[in-house]
């Protein structure tokens, strides 16, 4: 399988649907270890993304990813906007000129996305952030050979659940110190939804 422009658009249409459906859930996660706005931030950002993607024309996958990135960066106030925005901007740059995007190029793209988040967030794995889902998913892409054989969704789900056991050392959740243990990280949950949407596009 290769990712074409229409697949990329469908991916983010599905992300938006999932984010809207889970808006209250995401906010409830952020209520315990944050400032109760993660669902609101993500829902606002991805609705804007959907408004753009449903009305504009795109030449290649990189253009879709760049639109997603710029929209999230400009429309989402919280930490998550610039972080997801940077992820998709780096992804876009990595696959520029490659259309459709084959498995190897996609893998390079998410590697760059992860590096972008880590650099922008000055964070690494084990700090109870979205990185704790991005990183194992990237690893899963590196280990597998094509989209169909890749257990990235299982990996993402487990990784999201595992953020419960981590004490936050980055973002607002870090203020809760040890009290952040026992809860799923909001950004880890929304990252899971992004990959759940990707899985549905791949299964088509
Ligand atoms: P804010 O914290 O500004 O209210 P959100 O609630 O929308 O923004 O997003 C919070 C999420 O952002 C966290 O759950 C975490 O996954 C992610 N996050 C916060 N800070 C960082 C960071 N420095 N590096 C990576 N991810 C981070
Ligand atoms: Mg928040
Ligand atoms: Mg906030």
Image (tube, rainbow, N blue to C red):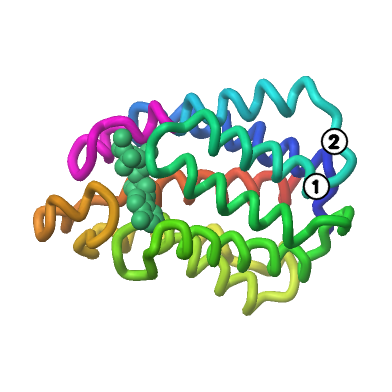
Q: Is mark 1 within 8 Å of ligand 1?
A: no
Q: Which mark is residue 9?
A: none
Q: Identify the residue under disc 2.
A: 58
Q: Identify the residue under disc 1.
A: 61
Residue 131, position in %: x, y?
A: 43, 61
Residue 12 belongs to the span the image colors magenta: no
Task: Give whichever of 39, 171 is nearer the camera.
Answer: 171
From this viewpoint, is residue 155 visible? no
Viewport quadrant of the C terminus:
top right
Q: Main secondary structure of the magenta part?
A: helix
Crowdedness near tag 2: few (<14), some (14–19) or many (≥20) residues, C-alpha within 10 Å: some
Residue 51, position in %: x, y?
A: 67, 21
Task: Give whichever of 72, 139 is nearer the camera.
Answer: 72
From this viewpoint, is residue 134 visible? yes
Q: CA distance from mark 2 to mark 1?
A: 8 Å
Residue 40 horizontal side relative to residue 68, left or right: left
């Amino acid at each position: 399988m290769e990712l074409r422009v229409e697949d990329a658009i469908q991916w983010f249409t599905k992300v938006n649907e999932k984010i809207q459906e889970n808006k209250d859930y995401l906010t409830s996660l952020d209520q315990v270890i944050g400032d109760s706005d993660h669902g609101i931030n993500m829902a606002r950002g991805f609705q804007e993304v959907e408004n753009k993607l449903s009305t504009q024309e795109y030449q290649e996958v990189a253009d879709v990813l760049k639109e997603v990135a710029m929209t999230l960066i400009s429309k989402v106030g919280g930490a998550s906007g610039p972080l997801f925005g940077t992820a998709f901007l780096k992804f876009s740059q990595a696959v520029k000129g490659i259309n459709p995007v084959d498995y190897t190029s996609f893998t390079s793209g998410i590697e760059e996305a992860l590096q972008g988040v880590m650099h922008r967030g000055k964070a690494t794995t084990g700090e109870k952030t979205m990185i704790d889902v991005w990183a194992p998913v990237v690893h899963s892409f590196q280990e597998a050979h094509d989209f169909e054989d890749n257990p990235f969704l299982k990996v993402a789900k487990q990784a999201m659940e595992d953020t419960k056991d981590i004490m936050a050392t980055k973002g607002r959740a870090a203020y809760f110190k040890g009290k952040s243990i026992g809860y799923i990280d909001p950004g880890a949950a929304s990252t899971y939804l992004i990959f759940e949407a990707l899985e549905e596009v791949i299964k088509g």
